[in-house]
Amino acid sequence: MTRVLVLEGPNLNLVGTREPEIYGHETLDEIHAGITAHAGQLGLLVEFFQSNHEGALIDRLHQRDFDVAIVNAGGLTHTSVALRDALLAVQRPFVEVHLSDPSTREPFRQVNFLHDIAVESIVGQGPRGYHLALEGIAQRRGDGHA
């Protein structure tokens, strides 16, 4: 069974209450419940890790106990060369997901250190983006490419 790590960065623990006009009203626990159900239907095993600390995210990646990741790095997308380096170092494919579309927001969000190394980027789809990522992973797994 394909093991999927859902890695989520700073402030995502506040989804549902933080700027709901941008990020929606669904809490992270509710989003995770939907991901778990959908992953089960697709024959994928998911594990979640959210942290507000860059080093904790990097340490989690270094465990390498997953086949593919879904990464919503939050604000670290625009600032963290270290997270980018960790994603490259662990040699696991990942799908980048953002609830909003950062490219349509503030100018500083135009910088994205992850986009060019992700197998796919899904932005602006809200929680549905995670489901689309799972479907892509399941499809690639069927093709022999996680």
Image (spheres, grey):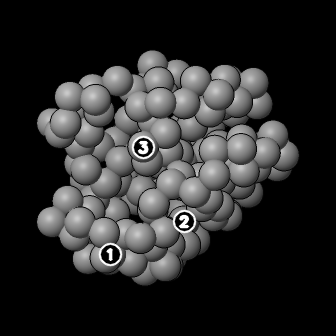
Left or right of 12? Residue 67 is right
Look at 81% across and 40% down and name the residue there: 62
* Residue that badge 3 annotates: 75
Look at 23% across and 42% down and name the residue there: 101
Q: Amino acid at mark 2?
A: Ala
Q: Amino acid at mark 1?
A: Gly
Residue that sits furthest to the top in the current view: 116
Most foreground residue, 62 or 47: 62
The quadrant where residue 54 appears: top right
Of helix, strand and loop, which one carries label 3?
helix
Q: CA distance from mark 2 to mark 3?
A: 26 Å
The tag earlier along the polypeptide, 2 or 3, is 2
| Nearest to viewer (mark 2 / mark 1) | 1
Name the disc covering residue 16, or none: 1
* Residue that badge 2 annotates: 39
The tag earlier along the polypeptide, 3 or 1, is 1
Q: Tell me if residue 67 can be seen.
A: no
Q: Quadrant of the C terminus?
A: top right
The tag earlier along the polypeptide, 2 or 1, is 1
Most foreground residue, 34 or 90: 90
Of helix, strand and loop, which one carries label 2?
helix
The quadrant where residue 104 appears: top left
Above or below, 38 relative to 123: below
Above or below, 59 relative to 86: below
Look at 20% across and 59% down and name the residue there: 22
Q: Position of residue 26 (x, y in %)?
A: 32, 77
Q: Tell me if residue 117 can be seen.
A: yes
